[in-house]
Image (cartoon, rainbow, N blue to C red):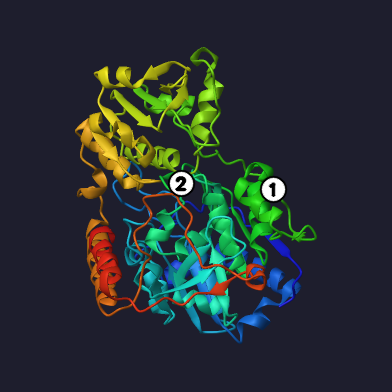
Amino acid sequence: MDTNSTVVITEAPQGDYLVDYVALPDNYGSKAYYDRQDIRNIDRTVIQNLEELDRRIDFTGSIKDKRIIIKPNLVSVFHKIGFKDENYPESTDPRVFESIIRYLLNYTDDIVIVEGSGRGMPTHASFKISGIDRVAKRFHLQLLAVEEQPIDRYILPKAKVMKEIYIPRIFSEVVRGEAFYISVPKMKTNLYTGVTLGFKNAMGTIPYNLRQKNHSYQINNKLVDILYLFKPDLVIIDGIIGGEGDTPAPVDPVRSHVLISGNNSVETDTVATRMMGIDPETIELLTDAVSRGFGDEKVIIVGREKVTPFRKADQTLLSDQFYRKFPNVTFLVGHTNSRAPKFDSIEKVMPDDVKAIEGSCIGGCIAALRQSFEMFYYQGLKTDFALMVILGNGTEIDGISYYFDRNGRAYTVDEIKRSPLKKMVFGSCTSTLAGFGNTYSAGCMPKPIDGLNSLHKLTGTWNRIFSLKNKQLAKIAFSALKMRKKRIKLVKSGIRVDMRPSYWDDSLSLIPHLSDEDSRKDFIEWPMPKLEGEEKKAILADVRKNSF
């Protein structure tokens, strides 16, 4: 395939696309379905886009000799799942995905659909809810759920964070150049990284426990690290209906009506970010990738970069937007980490300084907390409850630990203890306050579901996602049980499906000493010893407890 970096932008014809953009209808595959104007428009857009890209880089010449591994973005499929509205554009539009599949089938039938949804949403449930399982059945394609696959291990000598990486075995075919990898993300904003597009979609290719590990202020470096091992041969960004807001919580639809494709994931994502009205220079995920040489300043851009402004993710619990939704929540934060500002007097701490304290760990606990509150909000529940949320190990000034609210007011630990408010203590760095919290969630970062469960417990409300208001509950429960059973069976037979559960800390993984020659390599295969004994017991116990 031609190595020139090319991005192709195609605007969809005018029309109404706010129908079946999360889940395929019951009549999918029928003549009536394909006769719909939106389906014809999407087909036309996909064909126009990919034919233009092919004319410039001849990617179809490459896929004739390789298996295609194609990955949608189904972190969660929010369709009739217990929230206020029926649909949220969280996941790749199945109409777009199906149209891409039909285009590719003109050149090969060796296509495998691979995905790994977020913990708590088994991938096969995402396939069923979205209807992508029916796409696979219609065209006789294989569906693989990442969490149910054997894993391989590699060393990434040049990585900043993820020196040790585990991937599902099928992606080793991409590493070896035997398979052609296509990433098909949704065009949307994100709490953790600002935007979530082509190469961030790789988060869904790594095992559950590795996703949790370093899912903090290190997350951007961690995602860029993956590019040393493998990168998409093609990115096709679904922007027919975009998503704005606080992914992975529900997001609101944007009528962006565009498809963006390219053979350099960093440049394709950069173009999409600009078209969302966001400056790529403000997205650390992109600037880090460019600084490490994964971009291409000579990229050729075909088409018009029409800007459709997206509402940015609200990556804070200090904003006016948050307090409009949750007016009686008192959020207190204090950190002594190396990234946090230092003070010699509490009187010098201003509201902007509190934002800097909070921002010293912006990609982990804060985003998980924000996601938890948004998941609560989108259930349509009352949000005027009073609550104190505490994060961090305190800001030390003159030997005393203080926590600060959004106005810069300082609280001592004794003042927090005496507060009559119910207290939600969040994150391992806040563990010294766990004893007097009404709830405590450990981890760096904790699982967002822990924060959501705490909110429901402290407010005396029922999580509608686990009620009959969730019309997908049976599919999720059935898929979760099948997934757990398969994972247990694989581990019992000595096959690794996850790394050991070391995700409660934010340390870097230890790797063997490397020679000068090896330290200059992008990756090194690191075979794992036979799974047995205490290690097998530990992984089996974790799979039994934490598969959901």
Badge 2: residue crowd in 10 Å (few <14, some 14–19, many ≥20): many
Q: Nearer the viewer, residue 76 or 516?
A: 516
Q: Is residue 436 above or below residue 169?
A: above
Q: Secondary structure at mark 1?
A: loop
Q: Which mark is residue 306?
A: 1
In the image, which is nearer the foreground, mark 2 or mark 1? 2
Type of the residue with mark 1: Lys
Quarter placement of the N terminus? bottom right
Q: Identify the residue at image location x=42%, y=41%.
A: 365
Type of the residue with mark 2: Thr
Residue 13, x across and y down, in percent: 62, 56
Q: What's the CA distance linking mark 2 and mark 1? A: 23 Å
Q: Horizontally, is 462 left or right of 76 in the view?
A: left
Q: Which mark is residue 58?
A: none
Q: Secondary structure at mark 2?
A: loop
Q: Horizontally, is 513 left or right of 18 in the view?
A: right
Residue 12, x across and y down, in percent: 62, 57
Which callout, 2 or 1, points at the residue further toward the start of the chain? 2
Q: Is residue 540 above or below residue 387?
A: below
Q: Which mark is residue 247?
A: 2
Q: Identify the residue at image location x=38%, y=59%.
A: 209
Q: Nearer the viewer, residue 177 or 499?
A: 499
Q: Nearer the viewer, residue 164 or 373?
A: 164
Q: Quadrant of residue 452?
A: top left
Residue 238 appears in the picture as rendered? no
Q: Identify the residue at image location x=53%, y=79%.
A: 173
Q: Horizontally, is 518 left or right of 208 in the view?
A: right
Badge 1: residue crowd in 10 Å (few <14, some 14–19, many ≥20): some
Q: Is residue 332 above or below residue 541?
A: above
